[in-house]
Amino acid sequence: MGVSILKTDNYDVYVDNVPATDSAIYAGQWGGKVRVQIGGVDVSEIEAGSTIFIAKIPEKSTLLWGKIFIEANGANVTMAVGDGTTADKYLAAANASAAGILAFPLLIGTANLRVTVDTDIVITTAGATIAASKAIKTQIAYLLE
């Protein structure tokens, strides 16, 4: 048995600069610029149902992934990530009680994550009040033509 040479499913597509019709990346974005919005906020005893605006993604962008870095927030706290219209569009309510990272890899296996207007990315809290003096840090990556 010898050494193998393999290509990913989109390797030749990238070389030809024409993405497949079922690609999650639009033709004008193939080889485009990846940008990351980084933010942070200190929260103090915010109630369940609160909204935290974490990024504004420009129109004609395609969301790639996001991460929310959290401290221990107290029992029964959950966080969902959405676009202001649909609270859990990008991340369904996830347990945010313990310190850790809530991650949502959007591009993998997902099409049509392109935003057609400037779009707010928001966290919606649920379950219980977040304990006093907790930090939330965020990273949201998107592809821009």
Image: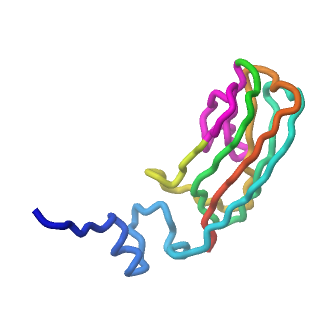
Q: Residue 37 appears at what percent x and percent y?
A: 73, 59
Q: Residue 23 appears at what percent x and percent y?
A: 43, 63
Q: Is residue 96 magenta?
A: yes
Give the magenta-colored segment's residue range. 76-102
Residue drawn 55% across the image and 72% down it:
29
Q: Is residue 95 magenta?
A: yes
Residue drawn 54% across the image and 49% down it:
105
Q: Is residue 71 left or right of residue 88?
A: right
Q: Is residue 105 left or right of residue 141?
A: left
Q: Residue furthest left?
A: 1
Q: Residue 124 appears at what percent x and percent y?
A: 74, 35
Taking 5 as reference, is 96 above or below it? Answer: above
Q: Quadrant of residue 59?
A: bottom right
**Viewer-proximal residue, 121 or 129?**
129
Q: Quadrant of residue 129?
A: top right
Q: Residue 122 appears at what percent x and percent y?
A: 74, 44
